[in-house]
Amino acid sequence: MSARYRRHPGAAERRVGDALFLAQRDRGSLYRLNPTVAALWNLLATPVTLQEAVEVFVQAFPSERRARLAHDVEMMLDDLVEEDLVERFEG
């Protein structure tokens, strides 16, 4: 089985104009997402694998190298997991 990623149940989102904010209730933390991370957050409305997320970004940014996009998506997911905004699970 491949690891999948999903939104953490303790994370809450709020849109203010064009900005997307996430709050981590358990930590009392607030984050403003840049447009790229916001796109990833939107993708996580349903659980995805790293590869599935990378494929979406490859389609959205065809002129970028796949390896760079894969690295960037992985780093974004790692950051979101570290901040308890996203969960990694086997499934």
Image: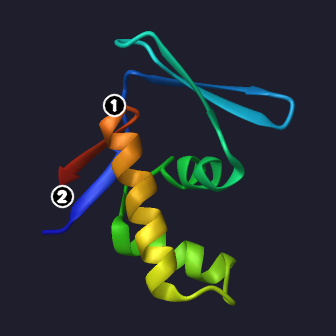
Image quadrant containing the N terminus: bottom left
Question: In the image, 21: left or right of 26?
Answer: right
How far apart, in angstroms, are the residues tagged by discs 1 and 2? 19 Å
Question: Label 1's element?
Answer: loop
**Mark 2 sits on what residue?**
91
**Residue 43, image x, y percentages:** 54, 55
Q: Which residue is at the far right?
A: 17
Q: Is residue 79 above or below residue 84?
A: below
Q: Residue at 55% of width from left, 88% of height from top?
A: 65
How does the figure colour the protein chain or chains?
A: rainbow
Amino acid type assigned to the residue bearing label 2 in the image: Gly
**Mark 1 sits on what residue?**
84
Question: Label 2's element?
Answer: loop
Using the rendered view, name the quadrant where residue 83 is placed: top left
- Image depth: mark 1 or mark 2 in front: 1
Image quadrant containing the C terminus: bottom left
